[in-house]
């Protein structure tokens, strides 16, 4: 197995192009410019954390142990499990809410398509899960690689953004068709 590691001096040089894509600045000069860079850096940080969570979940789905994940990150098995386990849902869910997960980039669209047929639609995207609400109509879900033009096109076609974070934007659309009854429905 080959290792893909970024060779930097610890300043995040590999992330500078991502940072610059998120600002309209060529070079910060004023305090306002530097504050804009801070906001952009925080955005990159959140996206990197989300990507790390997704890759850890994918590794778990592929059979990696918490011990091997912890070792690859230079932390203990317990620290890895605590940091990356599915978060507990605070409080009880309303009968018209549920958590769909754990999901990975490999299976989430198939799971969302199935849930959408029964009237469930995503209202929040988390690290390897979706918080879902139920409605009387069927829903469609898509995940696109971040592209302002593609997202604009989908929004023009009636899609609504659920969440956006590197490298994906999630959208949904109400089909207006009556949802199927779930087997447990009366």
Image (tube, grey):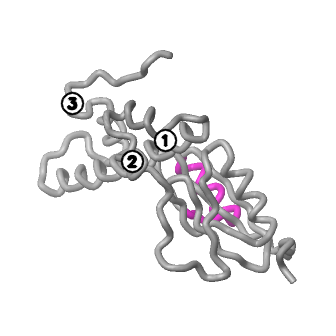
- Quadrant showing the C terminus: bottom right
Q: Is residue 78 above or below residue 184?
A: above
Residue drawn at x 39%, y 30% as measured from the top left: 72
The residues tagged by marks 2 and 1 sit, at their Cα atoms, a distance apart of 11 Å
Neighbor class of circle 2 (other Cα within 10 Å; few <14, some 14-19, many 20+) is some
113 left or right, relative to 41? right
Neighbor class of circle 1 (other Cα within 10 Å; few <14, some 14-19, many 20+) is many
Q: Is residue 162 above or below residue 145?
A: below
The residues tagged by marks 3 and 2 sit, at their Cα atoms, a distance apart of 17 Å
Span highlighted in magenta in the image: 146-162
Q: Nearer the viewer, residue 183 or 6?
A: 183
- Which residue, given by chain and number where applicable, does mark 3 sit on? 10
- Which residue, given by chain and number where applicable, does mark 1 sit on? 56
Residue 88 x, y percent position in the rendering: 48, 66
Q: Nearer the viewer, residue 134 or 89?
A: 89
In primary-sequence order, the first of circles 3 and 1 is 3
Look at the image and tell me whether residue 128 can be seen.
yes
Residue 177 x, y percent position in the rendering: 85, 73
| Residue 155 covered by magenta stretch | yes
Neighbor class of circle 3 (other Cα within 10 Å; few <14, some 14-19, many 20+) is few
The residues tagged by marks 3 and 1 sit, at their Cα atoms, a distance apart of 22 Å
Q: Is residue 10 above or below residue 18?
A: above
In primary-sequence order, the first of circles 2 and 1 is 2
């Amino acid at each position: 197995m080959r290792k893909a590691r970024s060779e930097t001096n610890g300043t995040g040089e590999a992330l500078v192009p991502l940072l610059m894509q998120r600002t309209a600045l060529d070079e910060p000069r004023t305090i306002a410019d530097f504050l804009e860079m801070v906001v952009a850096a925080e955005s990159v940080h959140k996206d990197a954390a989300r990507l790390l969570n997704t890759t850890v979940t994918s590794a778990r789905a592929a059979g990696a142990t918490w011990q091997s994940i912890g070792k690859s990150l230079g932390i203990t098995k317990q620290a890895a499990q605590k940091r990356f386990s599915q978060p507990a849902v605070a409080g009880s869910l309303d009968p018209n809410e549920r958590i769909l997960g754990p999901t990975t980039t490999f299976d989430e669209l198939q799971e969302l398509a199935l849930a959408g047929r029964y009237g469930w639609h995503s209202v929040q995207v988390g690290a390897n899960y979706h918080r879902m609400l139920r409605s009387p109509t069927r829903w469609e879900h898509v995940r696109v690689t971040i592209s302002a033009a593609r997202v604009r096109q989908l929004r023009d076609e009636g899609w609504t953004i659920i969440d956006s974070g590197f490298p994906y934007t999630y959208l949904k659309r109400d089909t207006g068709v009556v949802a199927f009854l779930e087997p447990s429905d009366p």
